[in-house]
Image (cartoon, helix red, strand yellow):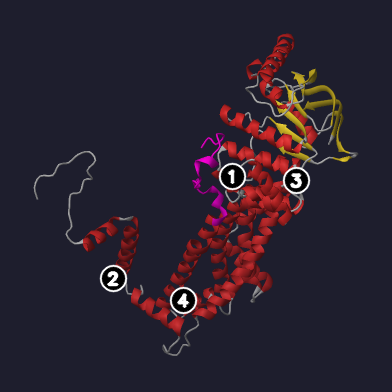
Amino acid sequence: MGARLVTATTPKTDYVHRNPRWARLRRFLRSDRGATWSAAVLFIAAWQLLTLIAPRVPSPIDVIQIMFIEMTGGDYGSIRRGEFWGHYGATLQRYGIGLAIGFVAGILVGALIGTSSLARALINDTVLVLLALPAFVWAFLTTMWFGIGWQAPVLTVAFAAFPFVAVNVAQGVRSIAPDLRHMSTAFGVTGWKRFRSLTLGGVMGYVFAGLRFAMIVSWNGVLLSEWFNGQNGVGFRTRFWFDANRYPGFLGWVISFIVFIVALDRLVLTRLQDRAFRWRAPVVETQRTPSQRTPSETR
Amino acid sequence: MAQVKVAELVKMFPPSSKSGEYVKAITNIDFEVDGNVFVSIVGPSGCGKSTLLNILSGVETATSGSVTVTEDGMPAKLGYVFQDARLLPWRTVLDNMLYVRDDEDAGGREEALKYLEMVGLLHTVDMFPGQLSGGMQQRVGIARAFSVEPDLLLMDEPFSHLDAITARSLRDHLQELWTRTRKTVLFVTHDVIEAVQLSDRIIVLAPGGYIYDDIAIDLPHPRRASDPKVATLQAEVLGRFEDMQAKVGGGDDEVG
């Protein structure tokens, strides 16, 4: 290679790859996505190394193997397998019902606190106390009240979710500009339509923020509740492996519910939030002919 | 064709601090408007213009006196254009138009689209307000107010937040819409020149909230800002306005 003329506009490259595949790999490794994948690979390698010095830590292979059996069924000693989906189904049912109760109650109470100062003076402190109560307290209390059964995990989820939704909705309602309220009053928009378009529309972002926290906190709640009162469910199964002193099973279930909540957040909640905030999307230049433009358009 | 009766209207605002006194926004206002006329209420800042409109629209209540807005004896339907567009940012342009309507069916949509077309914004129906310029947003606000087919249209300095070129173009839009629909309009402004171009009658308020002058403008609509007759009348009315300021003072930097 001869001398190259370098000007201010020439991109600086200090290596040249003959093979485009290597160039692509190198680009990938230098990208943010590459860093994320590298971190994951390094983590699993470190985990595997740890099992060499600490024999009570199950190896990644052990965990994957036992979870595979849990999911697909199969024979593994004297214990019946293939119960993964049944346990998840039971837990998700409790989680879903509890969340629905907490969510609806949170929206109603939050809207009340946000709109009426009297309601705020009455209820706000109570909601803050509920917010400060950890989910495991609800898991204990509901078991004390209702004993073993479906009520304890469902209500644990509802109680844990409710204050997060209520506090956020109240904040959202209070944040709606008084100008928009005046506009609605001047045009005589009242009742359900006003609530739906003005209040709900304005608090949607806050609702999703609240729902996200609520879902994470109450997920812990339902697992804990099942841990000491369930006959089935994710929490119950996790405890089963703990009591059986089988760490690969225990760790596998722990990983499964972490994966579940992360996937839920990434795949569902983030998308819902993006959809609710479509109106905040950057300005889209519309295709128009100059004749459609009027002098009043300053943009 | 609405009838507006404002009788012995007084509005006091409570003091902002404990030791402060009640603030008199409107001392005593008496006037009547009847028929399809364009009436401007002009005055320097602090003369109670916006307060008067807020009382008329029901956003605020009067301290004493009475305000009635009727349509053949029945309560009149109101339309409102504000200083800023006041659109729901999380609703599309079309949904904003439908928000103030009683009917959201196909007929209501058609009506809403008709008025959007009149202000030249048919192509924005599915866009969100944040994707429009300030002038376009205000045009949606104007279309919205006209589309409810109000008996009385209240406008509160609708062009004061826009640049001069945009404001001029919107005034033309407004005149065109008004000559087509002939609503009863109460238009609040601090801009005398604008008031002369748009209105049949100008009510001049003085600082402290009372009527200083009531001027009839007898020129055919629509009026071009470049028309010499309009310009002459603008100069004359501006002269009377300056006289008032010399006598009672207040808010001179706001008058144009």
The residue beneath circle 3 is A118
Whether residues under marks 4 and 1 lie with C-beta atoms below 8 angstroms apart, the answer is: no
Tag 2 secondary structure = helix
Residue extending furthest toward the right? B73
Q: Is residue A186 above or below residue B47?
A: below
The reply to the same-chain question for discs 3 and 4 is: yes
Chain letter of disc 1?
B
* Distance of label 3 from label 2 (alpha carbons): 62 Å
- Was residue A230 drawn as part of the magenta stretch in this picture? no
The residue beneath circle 4 is A242
Give the magenta range: A275-299
The residue beneath circle 1 is B129
Q: In this view of the protein, which residue sits in the foreground, A13 or A68?
A: A13
The reply to the same-chain question for discs 3 and 2 is: yes
Q: Which comes before the other along the chain, label 4 or label 2?
A: 2
Q: Quadrant of residue B59?
A: top right
- Three-letter code, disc 2: Ile
The reply to the same-chain question for discs 4 and 2 is: yes
Classify 10 Å Cα crowding around label 1: few (below 14), some (14-19), many (20 and above): many
The residue beneath circle 2 is A53
Chain letter of disc 2?
A
* Distance of label 1 from label 3 (alpha carbons): 34 Å
Please tell me whether mark 1 or mark 2 is closer to you in this view: 1
The percent position of residue B12, horizontal first and vertical second, equals 79, 26
